[in-house]
Amino acid sequence: MAQSQPVSAPRYPSRMPRTIALVGIDGSGKTTQARTVAAELAAAGFPAVYRQNAGGRHWFGRIAVMVGRTDAEDLLGRRGTLAVESVLRWFAIVRTLLRRAVTREIAVMDRYAVCQFASLRAHGARPAAIRRARLAYRLFPQPDVMFFLAVDPEVAQDRIERRGYDTETMDYLMAADAAYRALPEYPRFVVIDANGTPEQVTKAIRTELEAGQA
Ligand SMILES: Cc1cn([C@H]2C[C@H](O)[C@@H](COP(=O)(O)OP(=O)(O)O)O2)c(=O)[nH]c1=O
């Protein structure tokens, strides 16, 4: 994967946030940017590592195609997919938090609990299901900083089509965008314009980290 090269060496403060989460709708660039941010921080001498907090939708989607279905929801049903995703993401985040607790690492997280709350809402889950998910995550600490990669749903859909391993409808991407913006956590997000090139988005995140206010 191409990594962006900063023109001049970043000037980070000596203290960095210990947990940095990248959140946003599918196709907003979370994976691309989390990998790049972790690599840049590591290159600058910080013990930063990329941590994926996956929900399994991608892998179940692949299995679904192998057995002649279209995607994870076609295989497991909508409620089944949401339940599996909630459980897998919960375990993935626990693993990231445990690793972070026993090492000095700076965890650059590809997704966090809020992604699950937004996903549930955008997929039309019942309020009781969202309450259960919030209960399951209630003891999880908030990341020190959550970068919300704000992208137009049209741009996101175009990127998803080009990456070629899944599809999302425009209705879903718009619902997901609205769901993120309606989250009670939204005021805490550091909003990054993620419509630009990967390099532009990386630069915007770097600028926030350099300012030390993220
Ligand atoms: C960040 C970014 C990604 N991309 C590409 C890389 C991926 O193939 C695709 C989606 O990015 P990806 O990082 O996979 O997004 P997410 O993890 O939020 O679903 O878009 C761009 O074309 N431009 C960008 O600015």
Image (tube, rainbow, N blue to C red):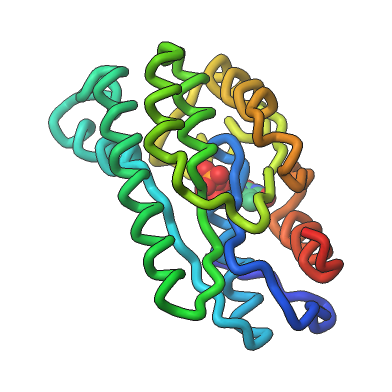
Residue 63 rendering spot, x and y as whole percentages: 20, 38
Q: Residue at the location (57% across, 57% down)?
A: 32
User: Does 28 sit left or right of 200 as displayed?
Assistant: left
Q: Quadrant of residue 106?
A: bottom right
**Outermost residue toward the bottom?**
45
User: Does 129 sit left or right of 207 as displayed?
Assistant: left
Q: Residue at the location (62% across, 35% down)?
A: 156
Front-most of residues 90 and 210: 90
- The vertical placement of 171 against 181, above or below, is above
- The vertical placement of 94 against 36, above or below, is above
Q: Residue at the location (34% across, 35% down)?
A: 86
Residue 178 rendering spot, x and y as whole percentages: 65, 21
Residue 73 rendering spot, x and y as whole percentages: 29, 22
User: Does 27 sit left or right of 149 as displayed?
Assistant: left
How many numbered marks have been drawn onto this rendered protein structure? 0
Residue 75 rendering spot, x and y as whole percentages: 20, 24
Q: Residue at the location (52% across, 67% down)?
A: 107
**Outermost residue toward the front?**
139
Front-most of residues 15 and 154: 15
Front-most of residues 80 and 90: 90
| Quadrant in which the C terminus is drawn | bottom right
**Outermost residue toward the left?**
67
